[in-house]
Image (cartoon, helix red, strand yellow):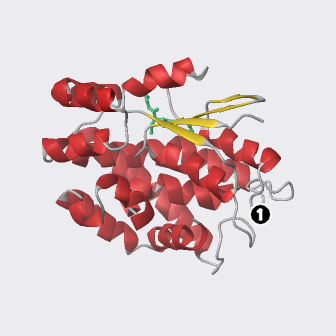
Amino acid sequence: MPTPRLVTIPYSHYCEKARWALERGGVKFLEEMHAPIFAWRGALGAGGGRTVPVLVTDDGVFPESTDVLRWVDAHGRPPEPYFPPDMPEVEPLVSMFDRKLGPATRRVGYFHVLRGDPSYAEEVLTTDVPAWEARGVRAFGWAIRRAIRFGLKIDEAGAARSKAVIDEVFAAVNERLADGRSTLAGDAFTAADLTFAALAGPLIMPPAYAKRFGGTDRLPSPLAALRKEALATKAGAFAMRIYEAYR
Ligand SMILES: N[C@@H](CCC(=O)N[C@@H](CS)C(=O)NCC(=O)O)C(=O)O
């Protein structure tokens, strides 16, 4: 079969979720990386919607990160299935993280990256993307940052609301972990663990993901403070442990 192609924004946590699932599933794929805004063209051109990741394979186009995990279950060799048929609790957990946690950590992450040093923001936005897109981001940096802020409703009030959503999701995860379990559903690593850890990424910044932000030492200080606070929670420490054990 032709090599599957994954269209991404390199630092996107939904893209990290798909990349992690494919790599762990032993799938060889090509990653086509774009800067934000420029990614619309890549995603639509691949047959997806406006968002990334989009996985393009022989047997279809998958424009949702969770569908990428399902595709890997069917076509890859993950050490354990992401959606075990006998664990119905995995699906609603993944869906809750996709709907609530992902948008919330993205807004908080963008809020702090975009309002800090513009050259740092530019570096995050352009690392690993085609040279012409990077030139475009540099030339129209202010307009691109404004478009992201506008498109994703990134402002002080939005970031505060999103932080409250993160706290709510973390509280639900803390509660789930209270019985001492080592993974979220049953005793096996599943899509629920992978999705929680990947989508908590912009806050938890495990080193394997933080490299997309220049490493944990270069995080804007308010984001570094939120990271410290999150890592002190059971859920935050859990996300880090999942990264270390399964990424
Ligand atoms: N439900 C989608 C969400 C993906 C998503 O929101 N991707 C963001 C990057 S983190 C994106 O492409 N945003 C571009 C836009 O909204 O215009 C999934 O799970 O794949």
What residue do we see at 19% from left, 31% from top? 138
Q: In which quarter of the view is residue 181 placed?
A: bottom right
Q: In which quarter of the view is residue 1 placed?
A: top right
Hey, which residue is sitting farthest bottom in the picture? 180
Q: In the displayed structure, would residue 95 be above or below residue 220?
A: above
Query: Tag 1: Cα neighbours inside 10 Å, few (<14), some, or many (≥20)?
Result: some
Q: Which residue is mark 1?
A: 80
* Residue 133 or residue 172, whichever sits in front: 133
Residue type at the position of mark 1: Glu
Residue 206 visible in image: no
Coordinates of residue 97 in the picture (x, y in percent): 56, 49
On whether ligand 1 comes within 8 Å of the CB at mark 1, the answer is no
Q: In the displayed structure, would residue 247 be above or below residue 7?
A: below
Coordinates of residue 182 in the picture (x, y in percent): 64, 76
What residue do we see at 39% from left, 63% from top? 204
Residue 59 visible in image: yes
Q: In which quarter of the view is residue 213 placed?
A: bottom left
Q: What count of labels does the image hold?
A: 1
Coordinates of residue 247 in the picture (x, y in percent): 57, 64
* Residue 25 or residue 107, whichever sits in front: 25
* Residue 47 or residue 226, whichever sits in front: 47
What residue do we see at 54% from left, 18% from top? 45
What residue do we see at 64% from left, 52% from top? 21
Hey, which residue is sitting farthest right in the picture? 86
Q: Is residue 80 left or right of residue 203?
A: right
Q: In the displayed structure, would residue 112 be above or below residue 50?
A: below
Q: Secondary structure at mark 1?
A: loop
